[in-house]
Image (cartoon, rainbow, N blue to C red):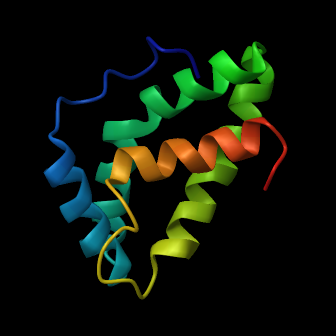
Amino acid sequence: MTLTDAASPAIRDGDLDALLVRAATGDCDAFVAFYDATASRVYAVLLSVTGVADRADALLEGIYLEAWERMRGRSAPPCPGMHWVSSIAHRHATGRR
């Protein structure tokens, strides 16, 4: 993935949080929408930490898999959705899973 592969739609943080709340109930479409809206920004975090595009690519899927698993059964994200998924990305990129 590169930053130009997908234009992430402009979406407010509150809308991202609402998508995660829906995803927590098992709504796959909501999680896909969350991914589409945030993946390019998460990739940018990964790339800035790792400095290697191939490594950032390899980490991206695992981050969203962890987010999906951690959101299931929650009533809300533990903090604003973009901040939360970025912190997961930063942990993965620095090897502190």
The picture quadrant where one finds residue 7 is top left
Name the residue located 39 percent from the left edge and 23 percent from the top edge.
6
Q: Position of residue 4 (x, y in %)?
A: 44, 11
Name the residue located 54 percent from the left edge and 21 percent from the top edge.
44
The picture quadrant where one finds residue 21 is bottom left
Q: In the picture shown, does residue 28 fall above or below 9?
A: below
Q: Position of residue 67 (x, y in %)?
A: 53, 62
The picture quadrant where one finds residue 59 is top right
Q: Nearer the viewer, residue 80 or 3?
A: 80
Name the residue located 71 percent from the left edge and 46 percent from the top edge.
91
Q: Position of residue 97 (x, y in %)?
A: 78, 56
- Residue at the extreme bottom: 73
Q: In the picture shown, does residue 91 fall above or below 42?
A: below
Q: In the picture shown, does residue 41 fall above or below 90?
A: above
52 relative to 74 in the view: left or right: right
Q: In the picture shown, does residue 22 fall above or below 29?
A: below
63 relative to 75 in the view: left or right: right
Q: Position of residue 34 (x, y in %)?
A: 33, 51
Q: How many marks can you see? A: 0
